[in-house]
Amino acid sequence: MAAYAALVSLMHIIDDLERHHSPPISLNKQQVQSLTENVMFLQEFLEANNSPVSDEADPLEMRIADAAYAAEDAIESHIVAKIQLSRSREAYNSSVSDEADPDDPKTVSSNHDDDDDDEEMNLFQDVQNVIQEMDQIKSLAMQRNTEKVVLHDTRRSFISASSSTEKNNSGMVVWSEGVVNGILERLVSDQRIPITGMGGIGKTTLAKTVYSKKIIEQRFDVCAWATISQQYNTREILCELVSQATKKSKEQLSEKSEDELGLELYQHLIGRRFLIVMDDMWSIDAWDRIQRFFPENENCSRILVTTRLLHLSSQLNNNYSLQMEFLDEDRSWELFSKTVFGVGSYPHELEKIGKKIVENCRGLPLSIVVVAGILKNREHTLGVWESIRKNLASEVNLENDKHCLKLLKVSYNHLPLYLKPCFLYMGVFEEDDSVRVSTLVKLWVSEGFLKPMNGKSLETIAIEFLHDLVNRNLILVGEVGSTGNIKFVKIHDLLRDLCLNQSKKDGFYHVIRQSSPRSIRSQRCVVIPRNTPKKKVLDDLHSMPCARSIISEYGSIPRIKNSGLLRTLHAYRKFRYLGDESYLVSQYVNLRHLAVEVGSMSSIFTSFTRFWNLHILIVSCIGKEFTAPAEIWRMPQLRHIEMTKGTFYLPKPSSDDVVVMENLLVLEGIANFKCSEEVVKRIPNIKKLGIVYFGREGIEQDDYYCLNNIKRLCKLEFLHVDCWDDFRAAPYALTFPQSLKKLTLVMNGGFEWEKILEKIGSMPLLEKFKLWEGCFGTGK
C-alpha cells in the first residue's frame, strides 16, 4: 500500500512541475518520460498483485516505495536548494547595491550561474540514479509470477456518491425491541444505567437507538451526549455537554475554563429533568471528574453510560447494568443478509456458505457488518464467497480481541489498492473524534495519494472514495447536513486500532509515542497526538529529516531538521501553533497544505513568493488586521484560502502580468471584498465565497464594493455575506448567480429583507438559505 501511495505522490510532483506557470526547476524531458513510464508500469503491477490473501510485507514493494521516495527527495531537495539560493542571491544583491565597485555584481552573477549549472548536473544525476533503480525493479516485477488468482478487480467502477450512506452499522438494529424497552423502563427507576460489553458489540449503537426515541425527547427537558474515550479531556467533554444542553456553539465557549464550563452546565441543569449519555467510559476517574457538575435534582434525571469494563458498571450502579451479549445464529444471519442484500431477498444457493461465514464472526456485530461490507461489493458467486470463508476460518481459534482484529484485517486486505491509504489515514485522528469531511478531503488531496481519474477533480474523487468506505462499513457517518451531504465521519475504536497497526507495519505514518518497526529516519508522515510529552516530540522530530507531513494535535511545533521539505503542516485544531514568533513558516518553501493558528502573519506573507506549490492556506490570527501581499494574485496553484479569525484584506490585483487563478475554489474570511471586473476575471471557478463588510471612512459610493458583480461568478455554489455596518444601499445591490446552492446573509438590524427576496426566490438550484438580523416591514 505504501508503495502505491508513494508512486502516486511522485506523479503529482512531476505533474505540478510540468503544469506550473513558473517552476523553480526544470526536469529533463527524457527523464520525465522514463520516470512516468516506470511509475505507470509499477502502479499497474501493484494493482494486479493486490492479493487479499497476502499478509506479509513484500520486499519488492518496499523497494518500490524506497525508489519513489528517492525520486521525491532528489526533485524536492533541488527545488528547496534552488529557492534558498535565490533567496541568498537576493540578500547579497541588496547588500552590495550601494557598493562602489560596479564589477562585483557581474562576478557574483557569474558565480551564481556556475552554481545553477552545478545544481542542474546534480539533479540530472540524482534522477538518473532513481531511473536506473526503477529499471531494475521493473525487470524483477516482470519476472515475478503474476498468474495468481486475483479475487478483486481493482479497476471496478467507483460506487456512486448517490449511494445510501444510512445503511451502515451505526443504524442497523441488531437486538430485539425488548432490549430497548428494558432500558427505557430502567430510565424511570435507576439514576445511572451502565451498558457494558466488548468493543464492537453494539453498545453505542444501542444507546443511540434509545437516545433517539421520541419518548426521550418528551420526558426530558435537556438531553446531551459526550464521548469519553481512554485519553479523555475533561474540558472538552464539558464543552460538548454545555454546547448541546444550551444550544451554544463551541466557538462561543472556546475561552471558558474547565470550572467555568462546569458551573454553566450545573446552572443550566439545576431544576430541569435531564438525560446525559457518557459514551465509551474507561475509568471511574473520568466519572468522578465530571459527575460533580450534575445536580441532584431528585426529579428523575438520568445518566446512561457505555463501557467495555464490567467492574466499572458495578461502581456506577450496584443494582443494574446491561451486559451486551453476542448475537445468536438467527440474529447474526439477519444482520449479515440485510447488510449484504438490503431488505430484498438473497440467493438461496449462498445461504449455506453465508452462514458459515457468519459463524466465524462469533456473533460480534462489528465483525459481521465489516465482513458483509466485503461481500456487498463483490460478485455474488460461490467461488468468491468460498475464498472469503477460507480467509476467515483461519482466524477462528483466536481469543475475542485478536479474533475481531484479524477479521477486520481480512476486510482491509480485500480493499482495492486505491482505498487502502484513505482508510489507514483515519488513524491520524484522535480516538472518537468527529472528523469534518471537508478537512479530511483537503488532507487526502495534499498528501498526494489520490490518483487522478476520468478528468474528475481530486476533491470529487475523494468524496467518492469516502462514500465507498462508508458503504463498506469501515467509516461511520457522524453527521449529515441539511442537504444530505455527509458533514462529519467517525471510525470505530477497533477499526482505528487496525489503521494504526497496519500503518506502523507499512511505515505509512509514524505516531509519536509509538515504536517503529522501520527506521524512524525514513518516516514521511508524522502524527503528534495531544498530551504528548514535549521531550518526546523534540526527540522524534529531530530524528526524521525525511518528514513530508506533520499532523499535530499537540500545540506548538519545534524547529526540525530539513524542514524545507515539508508538504503538509496541519496544526490547527484547538491550539495556538507558533505564537508571535512565526519564525518557522518562512522555511517551509515546499508546502502544499498550511493550516495553522499564529500570532502574526508577517512570516507567512513575507514568504509568499517562495511557496512555489502552496494549494491550501488556512490561518487563524486572532484580533489582528492584515493585508495579503500582491503576490497572492500570482499564485495560480492556490485552491483554498481561508481566514477563520482576524481581519484579512485582499489587495487590488495589478493590471500587469495578469494571472488567472483557475484552481481557486474556496475564498473565505475576506474583509471588504471588492468584486471588481478585474477580480471576477481572476477567480472564474470559485465555488465557495465567504466575505464580511465593515464600515470604512471616506467611501460615499454605494457601489464601491461592486456587489452587483457577484452574479458573474457563474460557478459559485456557496455564498456567505456578513454586513454589520450601515452601508446605505450597498447590500441591496447584491446579485446572485444561478449556480448558487447555499446562501447565508447576515445584515445589520435595519436591513429590509423584502427588497431582495425576489432575487433570492429566482435561484433555481438554491437548497439552503439562512438569514440573520435585518427586519421585515417596519424594522421593529
Image: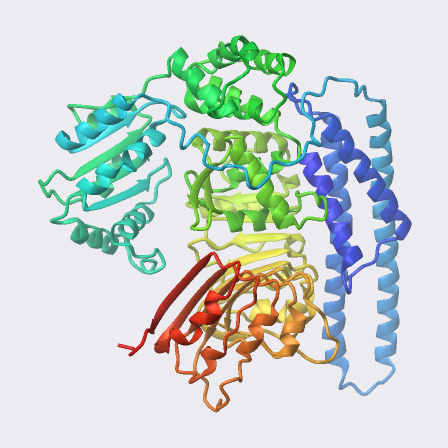
Instruction: Tell me if I can see residue 283 in this picture.
Output: no
Q: Give 590 or 778, whichever is nearer the viewer.
A: 778
Task: Say which quadrant the N terminus sits in.
Answer: top right
In the picture provided, is 86 more to the left or to the right than 445? Answer: right
Q: Residue drawn 57% across and 57% down? A: 594
Q: Is residue 62 above or below residue 590?
A: above
Q: Residue drawn 72% across and 68% down? A: 87
Q: Residue drawn 77% across and 52% down? A: 15
Residue 289: image location, x then y, percent? 24, 42
In the picture provided, is 298 more to the left or to the right than 304? Answer: left
Q: Residue furthest right?
A: 30
In the picture provided, is 466 more to the left or to the right than 301? Answer: right
Q: Is residue 445 above or below residue 579?
A: above
Residue 119: image location, x then y, percent? 84, 58
Residue 47: image location, x then y, percent? 73, 30
Q: Is residue 601 above or below residue 348?
A: below
Instruction: Tell me if I can see residue 515 in this picture.
Output: yes
Q: Give 448 or 348, whichever is nearer the viewer.
A: 348
Residue 305: image location, x then y, percent? 26, 33
Task: Say which quadrant the C terminus sits in.
Answer: bottom left
Which corner quadrant of the image does residue 286 belong to? top left
Q: How many marks?
A: 0
